[in-house]
Amino acid sequence: MDLVEPVLESGRMELVDVECLKGKTRWMVRIYIDKEGGVGLDDCAMISGEIGDLLDVNETPPGSYSLEISSPGLDRPLARDKDFIRYAGHKIRIRVAEKIEGKKNLKGRLVEFIEKEGEKIVVINVEGRVYNIPRSMIIKANLQYEF
């Protein structure tokens, strides 16, 4: 992440998420980017060339790889603390490491993101019931598109 953020910032874009997956013969590097007004194909193509060069120079990942640059889409991942702050009030779905009342997947409205006694907490309203979920328990979180 530290490698690509300066490139994106110079293009007035932000890094949303990075996925690095090891395949049988090569790595798959997926980088999700966004900017005010949304990301277009030209943005992805420009950033792909710049980031590809940067990865090659730094030999990251080691060996051959495929690089994908895309917008986060309608189900944007919430990967950083500032994402939870920014999208308060929106519908989200989260997957947690340990079951909460028998469930590992929760869908609801993100109420807020707080820090309480040194612990980061995601507050979510699921069908009228409010849950305070430690950020450390969240495996994956995404916006849920509202029609």
Image: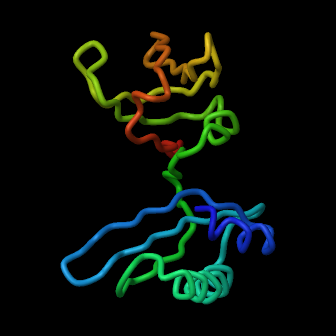
Q: Residue at x 65, y 30 (%)?
A: 88
The residue under the point 55% across, 21% down is: 121
Q: How is the image coloured?
A: rainbow
**Looking at the image, residue 56 lies above or below residue 6:** below
Q: Kindly tell me whether residue 147 is visible in this rendering.
A: no
**Where 63 falls versus 75 (above or below)?**
below
Quadrant placement of the N terminus: bottom right
Q: Residue furthest left?
A: 24
Left or right side of 83 for 67: left
Residue 2 seen by the camera: yes
Residue 96: % across, % down:
34, 30
Q: How many marks?
A: 0
Q: Position of residue 45 (x, y in %)?
A: 61, 87
Identity of the residue drawn at 55% across and 19% down: 123
Q: Quadrant of residue 99?
A: top left
Residue 23 image offset from top left, x and y in percent: 24, 74
Q: Is 118 located above or below residue 30 in the figure?
A: above
Q: Position of residue 48 (x, y in %)?
A: 58, 84
With 138 as the anchor, is 31 left or right in this view?
right
In this rendering, position of residue 84 left or right of residue 66: right
Q: Of 117 and 43, which appears nearest the observer? A: 117
Question: At 28% across and 70% down in the image, what residue appears?
Answer: 22
